[in-house]
Amino acid sequence: MAHELKGTVVSDDNNKPLQGVGVYNKTTGSYKYTNVSGYFELDDISVNDIIYFYQLGYENQELIIIEKHLDSEIDIA
């Protein structure tokens, strides 16, 4: 069964949404970019997938998917 991950990426400094952040699944190769509201949806997520968040000028982050992330919504700061 295919799962999805939804979420919002915000600035650590002022909690404002970040547009254009790359959201990359290192396991499957799929990727999306956050919209003007910092929102993203990534399909075909599985446990142990590695999700990489990146944008020039910000610290990159990785998230290893666990059961509670499947079909959920997360916030990344």
Image (cartoon, rainbow, N blue to C red):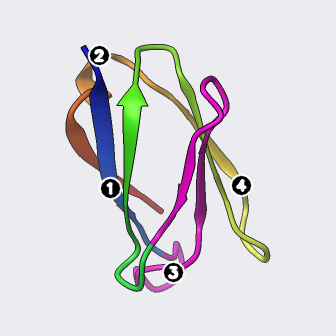
The Cα–Cα distance between marks 4 and 2, rounded to whole angstroms, is 23 Å
* Whole-percent x, y for residue 50 in the image: 59, 28
Image quarter in which the N terminus is found: top left
The Cα–Cα distance between marks 1 and 4, rounded to whole angstroms, is 16 Å
**On screen, 9 above or below 74?**
below
* Whole-percent x, y for residue 49 in the image: 53, 22
SS label for mark 1: strand
Residue identifier under label 2: 67
**On screen, 76 above or below 9?**
above
Residue identifier under label 3: 19
**On screen, 39 above or below 73?**
below
Mark 3: amino acid: Gln
Segment colored magenta = 11-34
> Residue, x 37% and y 38% (percent of image)?
43
Image quadrant in which you'd find residue 37: bottom left
Crowd rating for badge 4 (residues with CA inside 10 Å; few <14, some 14–19, many 20+): few
Crowd rating for badge 3 (residues with CA inside 10 Å; few <14, some 14–19, many 20+): some
* Whole-percent x, y for residue 66 in the image: 38, 18
Mark 2: amino acid: Glu
Decide which of 73, 77 is in the foreground and name it: 73
Residue identifier under label 1: 7
